[in-house]
Each structure stands twice: as C-alpha cells, then as structure tokens.
Image (cartoon, rainbow, N blue to C red):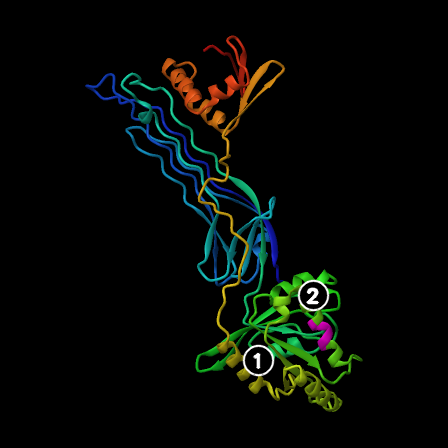
Amino acid sequence: MFVDKAKIYVKSGSGGDGRVSFRREKYVPNGGPDGGDGGDGGDIVFIVDENMRTLMDFRYKRKHIAGNGEMGGTNNSSGKSADDLYIKVPAGTILRDAETGALLGDLKYSGDKVIVALGGKGGKGNQHFATPTRQAPRFAQPGEPGMERWIEMELKLLADVGLVGFPNVGKSTFLSIVTSAKPKIANYHFTTLVPNLGVVDLGSGRSFVIADIPGLIEGAHSGVGLGHDFLRHVERTKVLIHLLDTSGLEGRDPLEDFDKINQELKLYSEKLANKPQLVACNKMDIPAARENYGRIVEELGKKGYEVYAISAATRDGIAPLMDRVFNLLESIKDVEEPVEEIVDLSYHINTEDKPFTARKENGVFIVEGRLIEQLLASVNLDDNDSIKYFQKVLRKRGIVDELRQLGVKDGDTIRMLDLEFEYFE
C-alpha cells in the first residue's frame, strides 16, 4: 500500500534545570555556589532515508517525543544534553506546520535533513548568580520547555519520467516491461490506484526512474476522482510519456483522449503541461490500431510531438522509445524548482516577540507571559537575595515601566500567575 500523506505530533525535549548547590569540603565549611547548568533538550530532526518509499510507518506511530536534558550537578558539573530524535522519511517529502500551513522543509535527496522543533536550553546553575554582594544565591534558572507541534507530511514521488494516460491504456504493463517493477495488472479501469516506481536500466550506466501515474479522468485538476493526489506526483518529473490506446477498443478516440489528458494537466499546472512529452501509441499488435496510428502521427506531428509505435504486450518499439527518453533527459538541465519560503527555525519557536503582557483588570494589575513563568520558576521567595534578583529583573526587562504606564500606584495589587503582592516604588 502506498501512503503519501500523514499527520504526526512531535515534541522536542525540555532543558534540564540548573542546580542550587554549595561546596561542602572538609576544610571549607562555607563554600561558594557550585550548582551546574542543565543539559539541553533534544531536537526533532527529519532526515531522508533512501531505503524508505512510503509514509506508511506514520499511520501506526503518530507521536514522536525527544528526550529531556538532565538537571545540573554539583561541583559545577553540567547535566547531560539529550540526544536529538531523528525521524526518517522518504525522498520527496514536504513538511508543513499543521496549524499555520507554513513550509518547514522540502526534503528531496538522500541525507537531506531539517530541524522542525528545537530542544529547550538548559537552565543556569546558581554559580552564575553569585555577585560580590550576593555570595550565596539560593536559586537557579529552570530549563526552557521543549516545543510541540503537529506536522503534516506529503510525499511527492521523485521520478525522471512520468507515465500519463487514460485508465487501461497499458501503463502498468508498459512499466513492468521496461523496469523490474511488479505493478498489479488487470483488464479494468483504475487497476492502478497508487503510483508505481521503477528503474529503467539501458546498460553502460544509462538509467533513469520512471513512475506510472494512476489513470487520469476529466475533472482531475479540480479533484474529481483522486485527481489532486495523482497529479502531484508528476510535478517533479522532467519528461512525460503519454500512452495512448491506439486500438480504440475501449470505444474512445485516442486523439480525443490525448487532448483531454493535456487539458487536465494544463488546468492543474501550466508548468506541468509544458514539460517535454513523447507520445507512445500502444497496442499496435492489434489490427485496428494501424488506421488510428496514421491519424495520430499526422495530427500530433503538426503540433511538434514525437510519436512512437509500440506494443507493451510484444515489446515491439520499446527500445527506441527508451533510448530517446534517455537522450532527452540528458539534454535537460536540472533546474532547482522555486519553492515557497521555508520557516527559519534558528530561533526558538516558543519565544514571543514580547515575552510578557501587562493589563489592568478589576483594579488588579496582571502580568503574564513566558518571561514571568521562567522568572517565578527560578526564584526562591523565602530567600532575601532571590527576592532582590527578582526585583532587579522586573526593572531591567521593562515590567516596572509597563506597570507605570498603566497607572500603577503604591499599594496597588500585582498578580503574576498564582503570586499576588503590593506595589511600592
């Protein structure tokens, strides 16, 4: 079974807390602070694995959580940072933030990787908070929390050549002949419900990847049938082979089929419709195909298309077509297709533009935000030095100035999370 879409939950590791500790040695009864820093949490990293072909595994494992950093130790020793969590995906996988739709990564080649969730930084131990006037700080900094998000994954097949055509024109049979792929083959419409990949080996190091794209129908560009799911897989191919049922035994005119398929490609993507396209007139072993073949060569020749007579059943005409495809691929330069801007994760996603907010509600001044959460987690309100540090940060980070702008006066109540206190200049 081919799976080309999946949605998973990821969470990077939280940083370890800094340690509150003091030297305790035989001849040093009142040693200084020696609390170590916490370790960093693990990142969530997506990486291409050339052995993977589908997103099937993510149907069964939807939660991926990295490890947390260890707490800082004594004697100035830092806690161990957690290992990054690597999530393997096949080449051609696109990653988006499920909530915003922002592009996080476009992983095309073996070894490509992208960080989608940065681990939290470890907190500083109390050794960092010692000053000439505060020689025994009894507080430390907590680790930053990890970030969590839902990721939408979409797999676009990476093939050099795409096979297109109406259902039951012989694409699966053709693929089984020119490659070692083993697609399911039967005489009914929509036998192929998933794209099949195969490698064409012409010898002497000449090879290319070809994809049998499931049969298109009218309205595919607007999502009729499985239109959007099918069309996305030909977007990255360099050359299209348009297979026609030249015999007309299905009751359709091959020239009308040709026009309808190209119209669907054009409506979906102008770029897709303009890709080099070779026409393969299949089922030439059937007598009724001869008459149609003449018309096809005449009509499509006027439009500049190269037309090849083949029979997937007898293998006639296959070799010349494959040689032409290879030579055409050699003449096409690899052009890096433009993609939308990828979100820069060099900063911590959880960091807000403004780390706190302040407002007045029912006579009470309320201050909230990540800065407040981290600050309150790091201070010891039973320790005088820790309270002084707390007040210093409130002034330094502009919280006091913000409260003044809101009209705070001596005796007013300030609320920060579960903590309430009176304000005095």
Q: Amino acid at mark 2?
A: Leu
* Residue interval drawn in magenta: 258-262
Identified at 67% across, 68% down, the residue is 265
Identified at 74% across, 62% down, the residue is 224
Disc on the earlier residue, 1 or 2 = 1
Identified at 60% across, 48% down, the residue is 101
Residue 381, quarter of picture: top left
Q: Which mark is residue 178?
A: 1
In this rendering, would 3 be left or right of 337? right
Which residue is most to the top? 411
Residue 123, quarter of picture: top left
Q: Which mark is residue 316?
A: none
Q: Main secondary structure of the magenta part?
A: helix
Q: Which mark is residue 267?
A: 2
Dividing the image into 4 quarters, which one contains the C terminus? Answer: top left
Residue 361, quarter of picture: top right
- The mark lying in front, picked from 1 and 2, is 2
Which residue is most to the left? 27
Q: Amino acid at mark 1?
A: Val
Where is residue 235 shown, x and y percent of the image? 60, 65
Where is residue 262 shown, x and y percent of the image? 69, 72
Query: What crowding class fits label 2: few (fewer than 14 Cα within 10 Å), some (14-19), or many (20 or more)?
Result: some
Dividing the image into 4 quarters, which one contains the N terminus? Answer: bottom right
In this rendering, would 278 be left or right of 404? right
Which residue is most to the right? 251
Q: Secondary structure at mark 1?
A: helix
405, 334: nearer the viewer: 405
Query: What crowding class fits label 1: few (fewer than 14 Cα within 10 Å), some (14-19), or many (20 or more)?
Result: some
Where is residue 114 shown, x and y percent of the image? 47, 52
| Residue 226 visible (yes or no) | no
